[in-house]
Image (tube, rainbow, N blue to C red):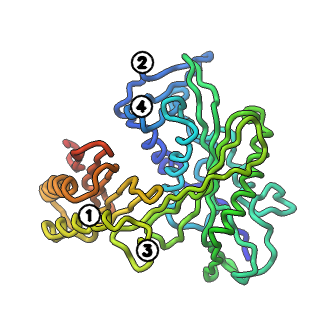
Amino acid sequence: MNVKRIRTIGLVAMAAIVLAACGNLKGSSFGSSSTSTTTTGSKATTTTGSTDSEFYQGVIKNGRYRTSTSRGVNVSQNDNVMNLKSFETGLLDVSKKEFSTSKYVFQEGQYLSTSTVENWLGRVSSSNPDGLNPKNNGKTDPNTRNPIYLQQLEEQDYMIQSGSKLTLGGVTVGLGLNSIDYYTKVQYGATYETDISTTELTAQGKKMANTVLQRLRQKSALKNVPIVLALYKQSSNDSLVGGNMIAYAVSKNGSTSITNWKSLNWQNYVFPATTESKNSGANSNDESDFSSFKSHVQNFFPNLSGVTANAHYKDKSLSKLSVNITTKFYSETEITSFTQYLATAAKRYLPSGVPVEITVKSANGDIQSFLARTATGSSYYTHVFSDQGDN
């Protein structure tokens, strides 16, 4: 069996996810009192500022957003891009439990290099003693081989702002764990699967997290700062939604082991339910509201290829709804009229009290319009994307 290679995902696409989560950069003023700058010689560090207390400010160094030293490194086997997105956003949500947005500034991970993460994601072997995944036992049967448990590893740094200075206040490290390990018995051969139970991947994840913690504590800058370790269960390749954060723990005062883990009951569902997704844990009222919305939209505008939604739940309560609509429209007037109708229908039918995003795309994937409402808002922000650039 071939050892799975490690790959690096495109940095631009992945950085955009976190930039969006750090706040509305367009609304920030780099020269205003909402930013801070610390200068050492010719080097300057600036924060983006934030227009919403829900989001972190980000770090800009020498006029550029400070990117991660290892962003996008993962084991090349999972083709579900939703896992990459929900891993990022889930890790931010976990971090907010320990590092509040009012006190801490977000910085992409700076302490784990690409080579370090690549080694850690590999199998342990004589040539890679730092590998966190189990050694290859030479077996190819799904039930007897040693699977790849750890798929992704992400570092996030949280800085404390004091006057014109930013100092490290804590670190979060997420471990993305496979629920299914995809593998081939021969190079370019058929793909096989090893199913991994939640119990098994959780146990393996906690064991790996303790090893990661011990290694982090060996770095002088991380010797005593709070470190959050979070476990993420990846969804399968054919899933229409990403996976979920399942547990986290906090190490303080320089401790090198964790025994007190906190379970997280976070789930993602697809509306309407599919054969693969029964939505047994989703609120039936939420799904009913979406069905009413979908029915009215499709009746009013029949030229639609699909109307679906990703529903995000925390402790069995809806926390966010992301609606995706694919159209067959070709004229801008149609898209504008449709967007206007969506704003009215969404306000009437979709659940209130939670953030809602609606993305309208063409059949070839081009975004035609976007609508959004905050959890406390009553009306929707709308924008129609124009080829003429005048909207």
- Residue 312 locus on image (x, y percent): 42, 58
Residue drawn 14% across the image and 59% down it: 334
Q: Nearer the viewer, mark 1 or mark 3?
A: 1
Q: Residues within 10 Å of mark 4 (few under 14, many from 20)?
A: many
Q: Which residue is mark 4?
A: 50
Q: CA distance from mark 1 to mark 3?
A: 18 Å
Drawn side of residue 213 relative to residue 333, left or right: right
> Could you say which disc has been placed on residue 33 in the image?
2
- Residue 241 locus on image (x, y percent): 45, 65
Q: Which residue is mark 1?
A: 289
Mark 2 or mark 1: whose residue is earlier in sequence: 2
Q: CA distance from mark 2 to mark 4?
A: 11 Å
Drawn side of residue 195 relative to residue 63, left or right: right
Amino acid type of disc 1? Answer: Asp
Quadrant housing the C terminus: top left
Dot 2: what SS?
Answer: loop
> Could you say which disc has been placed on residue 277 in the image?
3
Q: Quadrant of residue 108?
A: top right
Dot 1: what SS?
Answer: helix
